[in-house]
Image: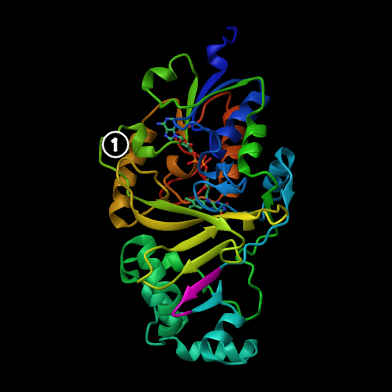
Amino acid sequence: MTATTDAQRSVLIVGAGLSGAVVGRALADAGWAVQIIDSRAHIAGNCYTARDADTGVLVHVYGPHIFHTDDADVWAYVNRHTTFRAFKNRVKTTSQGAVYALPINLHTINQFYGKTFGPADAQAFLEAQGDASITDPQTFEEQALRFVGPDLYEAFFKGYTEKQWGCAPSELPASILKRLPVRFNYEDDYFAHRFQGMPEDGYTPMVASILDHQGITVTLSTTFTPDMARGHTHVFWSGALDGYFDFRLGRLGYRTLDFEAFSGVGDYQGCAVMNYGDRDVPYTRITEHKHFSPWESHDSTVCCREFSRAAGPEDVPYYPIRLVEERALLGDYVALAQACEGATFLGRLGTYRYLDMDVTIREAMDAAEAFLARGGHLPAFCVDPLTGAKVI
Ligand SMILES: Cc1cc2nc3c(=O)[nH]c(=O)nc-3n(C[C@H](O)[C@H](O)[C@H](O)COP(=O)(O)OP(=O)(O)OC[C@H]3O[C@@H](n4cnc5c(N)ncnc54)[C@H](O)[C@@H]3O)c2cc1C
């Protein structure tokens, strides 16, 4: 039997976000030497939070992040690494000169139509608004018109979606509006998950705690180059899938976000997230960060107007577009990745999927477990980027 050398027990992880941190910690706990690099000057990837230097307000630097899950293991995991405070996301939207609660609920319907419906009457009323001639909705627009009718579609979905995705809802698949996003009661909690909360001091200390292991070395402000993989048994890649191949087949499409920050005193909007449904308002929403930490007290406030546009090569990739064109290119990159030895692609960029934090953590935990169970071997994907189906 040959002795195991250090190199045989060492991995390189690209990305110090949740994917990289969770895999790294599991492997370090199992005795592997873990080298993590990130091109950014900070850990925590897109969940990164930092205090505003002038006001002390905790800012969600890459957009608002609310933790919500039904996965008890994931909830236990994050609670081992930080203290969570109770937090419910109660989103409002400004549309056609009025403010409503989202998701559309009984209050929204009654306010919008000037009615006093109970649940059954509201449901019957809305069914009558829907376009029954659309029997098999194919597009986002058809789906919305079928189930909520033209008034609510115009007020709450059309303008917002055009701004968010940069195309008409008639060009988007019906699957984007998966379930009928309407509640016939007064429940206005944005998420329906069993466990919800906000890390007391933000996500960065939580990720720092995950990374806090003597077997883990983190090097920031360092972009991957192929020579860095030398001496490591395996590479876990949570950067962009097409980036691993130097974009040689072209670029997968993303939406990026621009944040226009402004600050002031007092309370700007009275809630954490205010959407703007009207097409003529150029931004999609305003986030007022201090409302994500309601247990803190700040005289000042920091807000961000959020604008969405197509990502260029130098922009931060936020939302994968995944329309027909991108899916074809994705298939080609998946084939390239599957032909690679010794690299596994993870997370929202590595698998080109929108992933909530809890799903990201679950997939990273499962990948690490499979890697260890297979004696340090893993194929390119544990989850199929095209279908989202678990393959390992
Ligand atoms: C606007 C927005 C809001 C969101 N809100 C929520 C929410 O409310 N709740 C929720 O559960 N989830 C939310 N999410 C999802 C959440 O951000 C992701 O689940 C999470 O960030 C995924 O972690 P990750 O490690 O896979 O990717 P990332 O956090 O993107 O980490 C990948 C890291 O890899 C690094 N990297 C990339 N390429 C290279 C390279 N070549 N060399 C070195 N380093 C590299 C990057 O710098 C980055 O730090 C939101 C996402 C967005 C876009």
Colour theme:
rainbow
How far from the left and from the top, in percent, is residue 380? 44, 34
Image-based side of 87 in relation to 254, left or right: right
Instruction: Pick the residue in front: 378 or 309.
Output: 309
**Residue positioned 67% across, 33% down in the render:** 209
Q: Please, which residue is most extreme toward the top here? A: 2
Instruction: Pick the residue in front: 144 or 48.
Output: 48
| Residue 313 visible in the current orientation | yes
Residue 101: in magenta span? no
Q: Quadrant of residue 157?
A: bottom left
Q: Quadrant of residue 118?
A: bottom right
Identity, as a three-letter code, of the amino acid under mark 1 = Phe
**Total label count?**
1
Q: Magenta segment, principal secondary structure?
A: strand
Instruction: Pick the residue in front: 219 or 136.
Output: 219
Quarter of the image containing the N terminus? top right
How far from the left and from the top, in percent, is residue 162? 35, 67
Kindly identify which residue carries mark 1. Answer: 247
Q: Which residues are magenta?
A: 92-97
Q: Please, which residue is most extreme toward the left here? A: 249
How far from the left and from the top, in percent, is residue 216? 60, 22
Q: Is residue 99 above or below residue 275?
A: below
**Residue positioned 31% across, 64% down in the render:** 167
Secondary element type, mark 1: loop
**Residue positioned 48% across, 30% down in the render:** 38
Mark 1 burial class by Cα count in 10 Å: few <14, some 14-19, many 20+: few
